[in-house]
Image: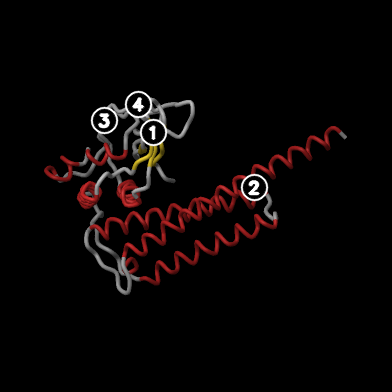
């Protein structure tokens, strides 16, 4: 499951109060690390602050990256998710001084984005087994064609069944799980592509940027399908409860 979350998507504002590293107020995107720190209930941590905390690890000591709170280990899955976040460069929400939401990308310049990806690449490579080197599968366009086909078939299946209202509650729950699993897999793939592309690796018969954009688009469609499924589930749940209530009254 994705561990990056937005600290300014509720109204009125809730936790987090401040980032444990920069002491910045609520707003921006935060990350929950494998140790649990960084979540809304335990030492909130901005994604960008986590990346900056990798500087001494990546540049001098060559030790595996660690949580800035407890020094717990950070795994490659977390780093690839953060790499995907930086590569997307989507606008995120911050509060202004008058407490009105404003949006801006996480990286203000191309140089900053490259710097963050360099830190993530260096940190990734000092984790045992974390060398940034593509497998034969990852340099084959057919592999990504296969992933795209799987995603598109799932999306089409969900959309058609929603239009026809043929899903049961159990089937909806199963499809939501399938969406989560596929989205998690595409997230890991797109994060790897972000690091491989930054490290200068090439792909036969294509380019990583093109493939990255395709996978990102599929992830957006998966999210939209998940939202539609959730609404469908809520509607069916209400109908089931109403039928049950009517039966008891009768």
Vertical position of residue 1 compared to residue 164: above or below = above
Q: CA distance from mark 4 to mark 1?
A: 24 Å
Q: CA distance from mark 1 to mark 2?
A: 29 Å
Residue designated by label 4? 97
Closest to the observer, 192 or 197? 197
Q: CA distance from mark 4 to mark 3?
A: 20 Å
Vertical position of residue 140 compared to residue 47: above or below = below
Disc 4 element: loop
- Choose mark 4 or mark 2, whichever is in front: 4
Query: Could you tell which of marks 2 and 3 lies nearer the N-terminus?
Result: 3
154 on left or right of 236: left
Disc 1 element: loop
Residue designated by label 1? 39
Vertical position of residue 140 compared to residue 16: above or below = below
- Choose mark 1 or mark 2, whichever is in front: 2
Q: Residues within 10 Å of mark 1 (few under 14, many from 20)?
A: many
Q: Residues within 10 Å of mark 3 (few under 14, many from 20)?
A: some
Location of the C terminus by quadrant is top right
Residue designated by label 2? 232
- Quarter of image, res 25: top left
**Residue at the limit of the structure toward the right, as seen here:** 250
- Choose mark 1 or mark 3, whichever is in front: 3
26 on left or right of 158: left
Residue designated by label 3? 21
Q: CA distance from mark 1 to mark 3?
A: 13 Å
**Residue at the limit of the structure toward the left, as seen here:** 60
Q: CA distance from mark 2 to mark 3?
A: 41 Å
Q: Residues within 10 Å of mark 2 (few under 14, many from 20)?
A: some
Q: Are marks 1 and 3 in contact (CB under 8 Å)?
A: no
Q: Residue 70 at what x, y percent from top left?
A: 27, 31
């Amino acid at each position: 499951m994705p561990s990056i979350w937005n600290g300014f998507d509720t109204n009125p504002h809730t936790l987090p109060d401040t980032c444990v590293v920069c002491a910045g107020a609520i707003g921006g995107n935060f990350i929950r690390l494998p140790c649990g720190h960084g979540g809304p209930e335990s030492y909130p941590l901005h994604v960008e602050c986590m990346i900056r905390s990798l500087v001494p690890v990546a540049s001098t000591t060559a030790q595996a990256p660690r949580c800035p709170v407890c020094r717990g280990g950070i795994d490659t899955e977390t780093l690839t998710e953060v790499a995907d976040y930086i590569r997307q460069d989507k606008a995120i929400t911050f509060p202004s001084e008058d407490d009105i939401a404003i949006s801006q990308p996480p990286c203000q310049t191309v140089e900053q984005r490259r710097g963050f990806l360099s830190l993530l690449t260096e940190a990734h490579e000092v984790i045992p087994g974390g060398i940034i080197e593509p497998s034969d599968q990852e340099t084959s366009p057919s592999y990504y064609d296969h992933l795209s086909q799987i995603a598109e078939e799932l999306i089409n299946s969900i959309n058609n069944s929603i239009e026809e209202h043929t899903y049961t509650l159990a089937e909806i729950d199963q499809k939501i799980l399938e969406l989560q699993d596929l989205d998690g897999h595409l997230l890991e793939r797109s994060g790897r592509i972000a690091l491989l592309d930054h490290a200068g690796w090439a792909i036969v018969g294509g380019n990583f940027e093109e493939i990255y954009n395709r996978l990102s688009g599929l992830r957006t469609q998966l999210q939209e399908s998940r939202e539609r499924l959730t609404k469908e589930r809520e509607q069916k749940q209400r109908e089931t409860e109403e039928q049950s209530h009517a039966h008891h009254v009768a």
